[in-house]
Each structure stands twice: as C-alpha cells, then as structure tokens.
Image (cartoon, rainbow, N blue to C red):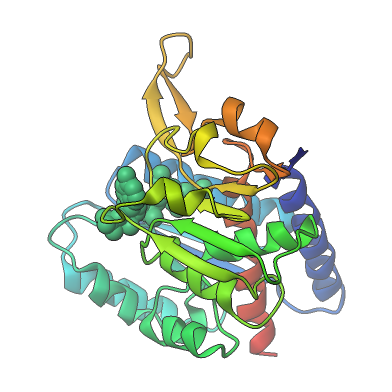
Amino acid sequence: MQLLDGKLAAQAIKEDLKEKTSALLQKGKRAPHLAAILVGNNGASETYVASKVKTCAEIGFGSTLKRLPEDISEEGLLAEIEELNNNPEVDGILVQLPLPKHISDEKVISAIHPSKDVDGFHPVSVGNMVAGTPTFIPATPYGILLLLEHYKVETKGKHAVVIGRSHIVGTPMSILLSRKAYPGNCTVTICHSATTNLKEMTLQGDIIVAALGQAEFLTGDMVKEGAVIVDVGITRVNDATKKSGFALKGDVKFDEVAPKSSGITPVPGGVGPMTIAGLLMNTYNAYVSKL
Ligand SMILES: NC(=O)c1ccc[n+]([C@@H]2O[C@H](COP(=O)([O-])OP(=O)(O)OC[C@H]3O[C@@H](n4cnc5c(N)ncnc54)[C@H](OP(=O)(O)O)[C@@H]3O)[C@@H](O)[C@H]2O)c1
C-alpha cells in the first residue's frame, strides 16, 4: 500500500510555483494575485480562507482578503466582486462558500468574471469543462487529478466509482475521470444517496473517490483488493482527547481500507492540501493567460 500523501505532492507544486513566481519578479513583472472574499464569521470558512492566503504568501503570490459583514446585502457583495473584476492586478477571485441565506450563491458565482473564476464554479467554466475545453477546474477535483499524476496512478481503462454528486466535488470528478486524457480515460460510476446497491458498486471500483461527507462510511468490506482510494471527506467528530475538542475524519475507515488498497489518501494531509494546490495552479494559469 502506498500512502498518497497530499502534503508532499502539494509541496512539490508549491515549490514549482514559487520558482516560477520568483522568475517573474526577476524579470520585473508582478506576482500572480488572488483575492478572497469572506462573508461573516463562519469558523470553518475562516480557517479555509486563512490557509489559502497564508499559502499565497509562502510562494510569493500576492493576495487580498476582503472581510465583509454577515449582513452585507447581495448588491453590496456583487459591487465588491465587480470592483475586483475591474482590477487588472487581481488574477483570481474566490468567494468562500457557504454564503448567508439572504444571498444567492448562483448570482454571486455568476458575477465573477470567467477569466478570474479560479474556483471553477462559474457556468462558463463548468460548460467548458464538460466540453473538454481548457478552463478552470474546481480546486478539489483538480487537486485530485494533480495527486493521481504526482503518484503516477494508472487510470486508463480503470473503473472509477465516485461517491457524491455535488457541483464542487463529485460531479466534476466524474466528468474529469471519464475524459479522454491522463488522468482519466476511466469508466465512471457515480453514486449518491439514492443509489440502492452502493456496496455492489464500490466493490467494482479500481479507483474510489469518496466525497459524501459521512465519517468513516467506506469500510473494508466495501472495497476490493488493490483499489486506489481517494478520501475527500472532512467531518468534525467530537474527540475529548484533542485540545480543539474534535478530530477530523475522512469518509473512509482508514485502518480497514488501507491494508486492502494499493494507494490511499490520508485525512488530514491528503486531498485538503491538494485542493489548495489546485487553487494556486488556477491562479497562476489565470495570470499566465493574460500575458
Ligand atoms: N478536502 C477538501 O479540500 C474538501 C473539499 C470539498 C469538500 N470536502 C469534503 O468532502 C465531503 C463532500 O463534500 P461536498 O461539498 O461534495 O458535499 P455535499 O454537497 O453534501 O454532497 C454530498 C454528496 O454525497 C451524497 N451522499 C450523501 N450521503 C450518501 C450516502 N449515504 N450514500 C451515497 N451518497 C451519499 C449526496 O447525495 P445526494 O446528491 O443524493 O444528496 C451528495 O451528492 C464533505 O465532507 C466536505 O467537507 C473536502
């Protein structure tokens, strides 16, 4: 069993981007710049955004964090996005989800200019992805592709079983794994809460991507020998032994599944760091596309 270590793979990508950024600066150019918008005080969102901004600094990217109050109006938020759209020094814009209930995610996502849509959620990016046209791919599935590539996981002709059909993970993952490219060329089955024979499906998976958000859902009896397991889930589970009072659990029962697998991502330290790597790659690509 090989540990598909996302921290290590992300580090390699960050080092490469750091070198590229330093070369740009030496040529007198500016660094790529990511702008993040955080609305309200959601604890998990604060952590995610802080980590994205910190990683930008580590590799020499510029970043802006706009903190907006929970009660900002939808128009107010759209105006902030428009300002960033018009700022030529901003390459990528992300709005951390979830947004407060009075604001439409759809309107906000659609307001981001497609050329700056580094989260890859804009309908134009999604359409391009489905059509197989180069575009911004949502950071988590992009990070997973980069991870499979880093560890040279064979995907051609494999049966990939994706659990979860969200717009940010499961659905794009299923599309990307089925495209005629590497990583891809898989036969893909996509499962969700209405799938009646899930175990029958997962037992066929040469590659399983678990993205359902249910702690330790995928157990040893649900996977075949030699499968490659990508665990996307992050669920906070109460744990009195931790200072924080909680532990982070993946969707996979690691101790049972790891011995049967040929490769598996840990949680934490698997898909999480790769998601940030995907976002940074998108930001760099947004910058380069303007040159
Ligand atoms: N590591 C990272 O960077 C990263 C990034 C994004 C998300 N995540 C984590 O990944 C997990 C999934 O995120 P998400 O945003 O995709 O979640 P989501 O929007 O809640 O989607 C969950 C999907 O799983 C399906 N599902 C739920 N229970 C199921 C079951 N018992 N059997 C089969 N399918 C089931 C749902 O089916 P229906 O469509 O039928 O409801 C849905 O399609 C979460 O734990 C999230 O925190 C991690």
Q: Quadrant of residue 226?
A: top right
Residue nearest the observer in this picture, 60 or 134: 134
Query: In the image as oriented, which residue stretches furthest toward the left?
Result: 102
Residue at the image position 26 percent from the left and 56 percent from the top: 194
Residue 115 place in picture, x, y as percent: 51, 85
Q: Quadrant of residue 121?
A: bottom left
Q: Compared to 241, does 9 lie above or below?
A: below
Q: In this rendering, would 60 be left or right of 56? A: right
Query: In the image as oriented, which residue stretches furthest toward the top?
Result: 241
Residue at the image position 43 percent from the left and 81 percent from the top: 126
Q: Compared to 169, does 52 lie above or below?
A: above
Q: Compared to 152, does 77 lie above or below?
A: below
Q: In this rendering, would 129 be left or right of 217? A: right
Does residue 118 appear anywhere in the picture? yes
Q: Quadrant of the C terminus?
A: bottom right
Q: How many marks?
A: 0
Residue at the image position 73 percent from the left and 56 percent from the top: 59
Does residue 90 appear anywhere in the picture? no
Residue 150 place in picture, x, y as percent: 78, 58
Residue nearest the observer in this picture, 291 or 140: 140
Residue 45 place in picture, x, y as percent: 38, 46
Residue 20 place in picture, x, y as percent: 82, 69
Residue at the image position 25 percent from the left and 67 percent from the top: 105
Q: Quadrant of residue 5?
A: top right
Q: Quadrant of the N terminus?
A: top right
